[in-house]
Amino acid sequence: MTLAALRLRGALRSLAARPAWLAGSLLLLTAVTYGGYRLVRAGVTWIYAYPLIDTIAPAVTQRSLEGLFLMLMAAVLFSVLVASIGTLYGSDDLELLLAHPTDAARVFGMKVLELFVNAAGLPLLFTLPVLAGVGVALDAHPLYYPVSVLAAAALYALPVTLGALLALVLVRLSPAGRVREVATAVSISAAAAALLGLRALRPEQLLRVDPQDTAAFESFLTAFARLEIGWLPPAWATNASWAALDGRLHASFAALVGLGGLGLLLSGSLAHLAFARGWVRSLDTAPAARTRAARPTPAWERFLTRRLGAVGAILAKDARVFARDVQQWSQVIVLAALAGVYFVSLAAIPVPTQQFRDVMGALNIAFVSFIVAGVALRIAYPTVSYEAGSYWLAQVQPLRKRSLVLAKFLFTLPLMLALAVGLGVAAGRVLDLSPTLAFGAPLAAGFSAVGLTGLAVGLGAAHPRFQYTNPNELAMTPGALTFMGLALLYATLTTLLLARPAWTALQRPGAAAYWTSPEGLAVIAMLTALTLLATVLPLWHGTRQLTRFEG
């Protein structure tokens, strides 16, 4: 049996261990992706039918597709570096695989494929319904579907290749034992450079419009259609997909697929060469020991332990581990940088009227919920599994599993609240929203933080994986897929509940007392009930399943 077949069989057995959850995960993901497909299909159909857009509809659709590709490619790029180091050079099963009577080149080829799945799997999954919606709305040639999917996969292979190559440089040159810290610094620098570069381009100069309703909207779309990024790879993927609508193969398709495929092959070959020649010296070498004088227990740690007992002790331990583990805290910075890129771009666009600003603010309410879901997948969901080899200590101690799960929730919640509410407040400030939406944006973000944190921690406790080769694979387990399906469902329901306040803000921008009216209080009550359901039920279920867990 080949190594790939062995790993595939192991993955299938892991999926089949809980068939009910697997079926539920697939059902949820199917429903969510189908909903995204229908939404994109309806949006493209509307654009082509709207009289104000007229002949620029193809250009508007192309620019929108380029924007999606660019945002998802940036998401992969900002997070792949630390994942590359953990997958290609720090996986716990790497020594065992290299001792196996299999060609080492195949081992690293499989590791590169594993890196691609872990880093780009979810962006590619979110891209598929968008491509399908565009194809069906425009009555695409059958060639469009395989070409567009291959172009998207090749596009996301480019940042994976870049991250793998940079990881090789870092494991060779970084100080002993500090490669992950250096990688995180590089990722943060790249995010900051993206922010500065975006401001240096000043794309808002293309969008200067006069504040006249119909004329401004048409001028806005015309300027948007002129935003060309043909020198960037996302435009290559868009051009390849667009040509395939008519059954043609664009030259950019061959260039993109060739570059992406060669990049992955080069990454695997160089990783193999690095191990064969002993270049990897930063991971298996500990930094020089430093003698430190004993210090008394900090006041904050004593306070947590005395006030909260076992829960407080776990909180104190998790705070120390979080501060020391780059794999955990770097995810927050990278995702916050992505959100910063989005909002800097948003603030630079001179939206012509208050009504247009409120439309964008209503869309941002849904966007923030999806951002929070993505952060929760990386930050909150793996918290129980991060106990890893030390979980046996919790099993032999007089520690209730309820205290462990509750501590994970309480530790993650402030981080999620700070990020989510910060995004909600920032959206209201940069867009200068009407009072109804200015209050609704942080309100929805706060509810999303609580509900999605409880959902993530609960499902992570219900599907623990204490034995993993690297932490990045936790985001692609059956439990993680279940969380993503339920999180997207929660975000959709939240958006639907807030549709009425958004519509009221569009009709009456100056209505500041909406949230104190009976209707506004009813919306808050329904959001509260939905959030409590999404928080308490998963935490209870996760505690119950963790109590039964033996390992």
Image: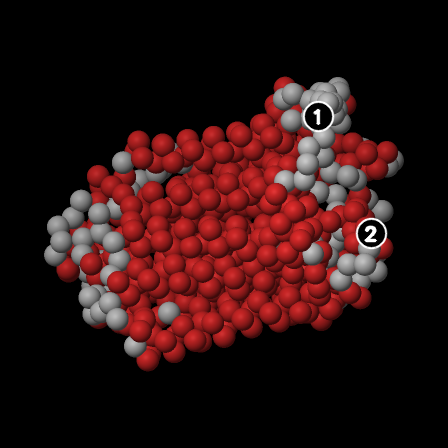
The numbered mark, 2 or 1, whose residue comes first in the sequence reads 1
Which residue is identified by label 2?
392
Evaluate if marks 2 and 1 touch, with contact meaning CB atoms under 8 Å apart.
no
Task: Please tell me which residue is depicted at 51% across the width and 69% down the height of the picture.
Answer: 531
Which residue is identified by label 1?
292
Q: Nearer the viewer, residue 342 or 511?
A: 511
> Closer to us: mark 2 or mark 1?
1
**Residue 52 position within the rendered picture, expressed as x and y whole percent measured from the top left:** 19, 60
Task: Please tell me which residue is depicted at 31% across the width and 40% down the height of the picture.
Answer: 228
**Residue 119 position within the rendered picture, expressed as x and y whole percent measured from the top left:** 59, 44
Bin the neighbour count of mark 2 within 10 Å (Cα to Cα): few under 14, some 14-19, many 20 and up: few
Calculate the distance from the C-alpha at mark 2 to the C-alpha at mark 1.
29 Å
Bin the neighbour count of mark 1 within 10 Å (Cα to Cα): few under 14, some 14-19, many 20 and up: few
Task: Please tell me which residue is depicted at 61% across the width and 43% down the height of the picture.
Answer: 299
**Residue 300 position within the rendered picture, expressed as x and y whole percent measured from the top left:** 60, 45
Amino acid type, residue under disc 2 in the picture: Trp
> From the viewer's perspective, is residue 321 above or below residue 382?
above
Q: Is residue 89 left or right of residue 204?
A: right
**Disc number for residue 130:** none
> From the viewer's perspective, is residue 548 above or below residue 480?
below
Which element is circle 1 on? loop
Q: Is residue 10 left or right of residue 369?
A: right
Determine which quarter of the picture holds residue 217: bottom left
- Asked whether the viewer can see residue 374, the reply is no
